Every structure is written in C-alpha cells, then in structure tokens.
Amino acid sequence: VELAPQGIRVNSIAPTFIETPMTAPYFESKAFRDEVLSKIKLGRLGRVEDLMGAVVFLGSDAAALMTGTSIRIDGGWTAE
C-alpha cells in the first residue's frame, strides 16, 4: 500500500507444497507425504502449472486494481 500512490502494485501467491526437484527429498518420507496430503483437501501436491494462471492474472491488466493481497493456491488446506 505504501507504493500504490506511485502506481506500483504488490501482490503475492501463497501456494501449498509444490512438487519440484527441491521439494522431492522431503516427500521421500512416507510419513511426511501422508501428513501433508491429509491437509490438502484436493488430495494431491501442487504442480508448477497450478500456479501459472495466478501469475498470468497478476501480471495482466485484469488485476489492475489489485494491490496488497495474496492469492492462496493451497488445494483447500486453509479452507477449514
């Protein structure tokens, strides 16, 4: 909000666990994987592709009036 008067928008994306080479070692633990999946209501880990729509939206004119917000892409984790 401090930069809004200069026309600078600041938003974020708050994803759940995303399957990447960096996160792969964590999911080698069945207990950890099961715990995470029990919290993601859609029942699967996120993929990078799951974030692309929000990235494109935030970078487009469709989000021209958005600033100071975060878009949750968490498969329902925080909906409870």
Image (cartoon, rainbow, N blue to C red):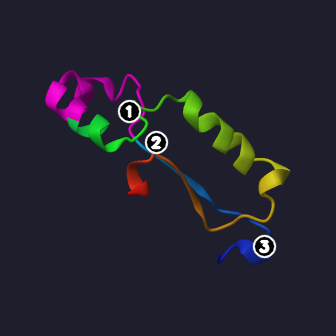
Does residue 51 belong to the magenta stretch?
no
Q: Which mark is residue 62?
A: none
How dense is the environment of label 3, judged by Cα within 10 Å: few (below 14), some, or many (20 and up)?
few
- From the viewer's perspective, tell me whether residue 41 is left or right of residue 57: left
Judging by the rendered image, the residue that carries numbered circle 2 is 75
In the depicted view, which residue is nearer to us: 11 or 2?
11
Judging by the rendered image, the residue that carries numbered circle 1 is 43
Observer-side mark, 2 or 3, equals: 2
Kind of residue at disc 1: Gly
> Which region of the structure is painted magenta?
17-34
CB contact under 8 Å: marks 1 and 3: no
Kind of residue at disc 2: Gly
In the depicted view, which residue is nearer to us: 7 or 37?
37
- x 82%, y 52%: residue: 62
Q: Quadrant of residue 22?
A: top left
- x 37%, y 41%: residue: 40
Kind of residue at disc 3: Gln
CB contact under 8 Å: marks 1 and 2: yes
How far from the left and from the top, in percent, is residue 9? 71, 63
Q: Quadrant of residue 34?
A: top left
